[in-house]
Amino acid sequence: MSKLKNNTSSDSKPPKSPKPKGRRKLDIWNKLAIGVLTVFLVGCISVFFILVNIVNDPDGMRFNQDGLVTTQNTRIFDGNGNLWTELGSEIREDVSYEQIPQSVIDAFLAIEDSRFFEHNGFDLPRFMAAALTNLRTGDFSQGGSTLTMQMIDNAFTKQKEEQLKESGSYTTVDQIKLKVQEIYLSLIAEQTIDKEAIFEFYVNRIWFGSGGNTRGIQKAANYYFNKDVSQLNVGEAAFLAGAINAPDYYNPINNINDPDTDHLQLATERRNTTLTMMLQHGYITEEEYNLYVNTDLSFSLQYVEQENSNPYAAYLDQVLNEAATLTGQDPAIVPMDIYTCLDTDLQNQANAICNGEIFAFPDEAFDVGFTVVDNDTGEVLAVGPGRFYDSTSADRKDSSIMQRSPGSSMKPLLAYASTFDILGWSTVHTVNDAAKDYFKSGTNLGNSDGKYDGKMSLARALGVSKNTPAAQAMIDLVDQTGYDHWIEYCKNLGYTDDVAEAFVEQYCIGGADMQASSREQASAYTIFANGGKRIEDHTIRKIVYRNDNSEVTPNLEPIQVISEQAAWMMSQLLYDVVNGNYGMMNDQLASSSYPIYGKSGTSDWGIYGLEYGIPQAAIRDEWSVGYSSAYTVACWSGYLTQYEQQGYYIPVNQIIYYNMAFEITDYLLDYMSSREQYVDIPRPDGITDYKGGYIKTEFASKGDPDTSSTDDDEDDTSEEQQACEAEGGTWDAESSTCVKEEEEEPETPTPEEECIANGGTWDGTACTYPPTPEEECIAQGGTWDGTTCTYPPTTGGGTGGDTGQGGSGNDGNTGAQTQNIAAILSWDPRKLIQQLLNLF
């Protein structure tokens, strides 16, 4: 026991305390994991804030459902309500989801977005695959976009891209930012509108390679297959869905202009790819696949070649200008439906005239410009822009609205029409054709026939287009009313404010700054057939805004320019101008089938053409204005400034060959007579028969003391004495001779002077004249029928020069002369004989 105790004692030592355990050190992998996680979290937070900043960028894109609505184009309708053209930055015809056949929907889903009806606007797996490809290539060309994203791209992204490119700061960073914003807007869009609406917006905006600036699937169906979208079959639907990937590349019609690339083969292969995808997704059966994949695409194409030029382009130009004036907006930008007055049948006739298909032009530079207006409505039915109108040029050269001196066609409007209202004249009033400096220019006013005939009837003065009686009548009218009346009067006739406010008495014969277009002259003359009222000439009946259906219409309130009695009395005189056998070109308008009224107008060059080698007496502008009870036609003929500067002019002694203005007026009035029966303009109340003519009843009791009634025998003065006194001489009754003070024998012109004055070329010994139209016709291989030349059919045509805006060569004393054909032809016996033969 002691042993045991001792053992215990010897072995009892205090126990050792345990050593504290040290911290385990992190190995390299744990450190790496923590680092990656930290970077990932920081990256996620950073990306989050970056995305928030991108999405909330004040200069970034914002979703607006109104922005998804496709911008509609402006449509133009003719007088019968038929659509004849469209314009706008994008031409489209929207269709609803219900109008789109299921085969079209299936084709788009198969090739573009098979999970369209499942995702929320952003398909992450597809997008990631495309993103990896983009990062690898660095060009960001791969898609991966859903249909929703493509809709946002068409509606918003492309516009923003254009803005950045224009600013010169479009970078890769900008591309990424726009793509992020596009995804975000797609998510917003899916929460705002349904899938069907998204699909509808999408197919109405995209380009399928269709012609011009057309957009949308409806225009594509029209362009490729000449059918409505609802009529597309599976193969056609597959082609259209596949084509949007590269519309121009997959356009089979491009084989016409690009034979080096087989676009038809490429389009067929792309269609077959779409059909394969449709088969894989179960949209079509194996049988349908085999049917359409083996169908020749060219058999389905029903392409109708579009005209490069609009046959009604000149009329369209005037419509667009008028629309901009009416609305203050550009129809090419703001979508409108514009209902016009265009008579397409009549416009086709106008085009044929300008193309030389109805009348032969006397030379390659001679031009015309004309307008047809409805008397009752003021509607412009057709325009003739001339031979050199070019719709593709910034300088259109529309001769129908080009302003030139209207010559004597102003006499009825200014000098005479108001005399019945203001001066109490009758239609048998006597006027005096006398030598006098009417306009105080230092020179006596001359007449086209170079003589003064003394007292004559108003009808004859108008029929032979005497200048001096018109000048005196205008002076008397201004004395009665003052200038302000005539400024307003000219505005009421439809002339521009600049022209009206520069009014002087010379306007009555087309002198001074009197300038007018064929459209203005046609509109002004409607007062004579419309009871003295003028309705503003217009090409537009109404405009309907396509966004809200609000309407704009022109002001068609009639303006009473002269009394209805004065208008009717003037028409009686203008009927006599056409039918009175005065030997003037107005005779060409006469018809035995219906009444026609009209007046010619001519301006000469005077001294203004000398710098171009043009004789002073040469004619510059020739006008014809004719009207019936229904329509008015005004036609100008002459040369554009470019050709005038080359020395072109109308020779006085050959004017019969340059009478196209009268031929055109007569042709158009006759053509329109089949539309509406022409009748005598009805006589209104307030007119009294007076000495073989007419006078307003309010003046009947007072009478017209200066009349040329055949019943009035008080004036026994002989015609010789009247002519003598008109020329400033004194009549010696005893010797029956005319005595003039300081009368001098006129100097006989030298052969050289006479040659040059008549348009010839003097070579020192002999005079050479330009060939007559007949000689020129035969020399150029044509056939001469006595009045016109017929050439064998040719192609092509020239382009013209500047429109004439310069002076008329009319100083108020020599200008605005209508030529007496009998006097003109007497200068050339051959022409006189030919004319006499034509008459019989």
Image (cartoon, helix red, strand yellow):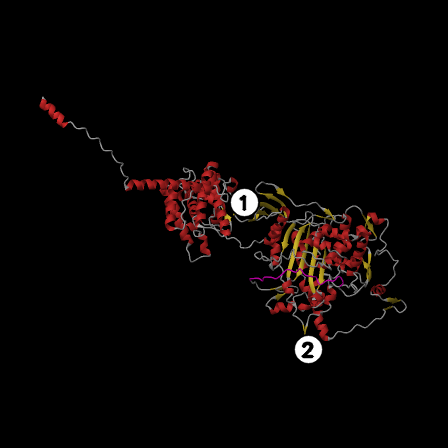
Q: Is residue 280 magenta?
A: no
Q: Nearer the viewer, residue 293 or 170?
A: 170
Residue 335 position in % (x across, y down): 57, 45
N-term-proximal mark, 1 vs 2: 1
Q: Nearer the viewer, residue 790 or 140?
A: 140
The tag on residue 764 is 2
What is the span of residues highlighted in magenta in the rendered image? Answer: 795-813
206 relative position to 817: left or right: left
Element carrying mark 2: loop
Q: Give the quarter of the figure containing the C terminus.
A: bottom right
Q: Going by the image, does 381 lie left or right of 193?
A: right
Q: Main secondary structure of the magenta part?
A: loop
- Residue 452 is situated, as x and y percent measured from the top left of the image, at 80, 64
**Amino acid found under the numbered disc labelled 1:** Gln
- The residue labelled by disc 1 is 72
Residue 164: image x %, image y %?
A: 49, 49
- Kind of residue sitting beneath label 2: Gly
- Please tell me which residue is depicted at 45% across the width and 38% down the height of the picture: 190
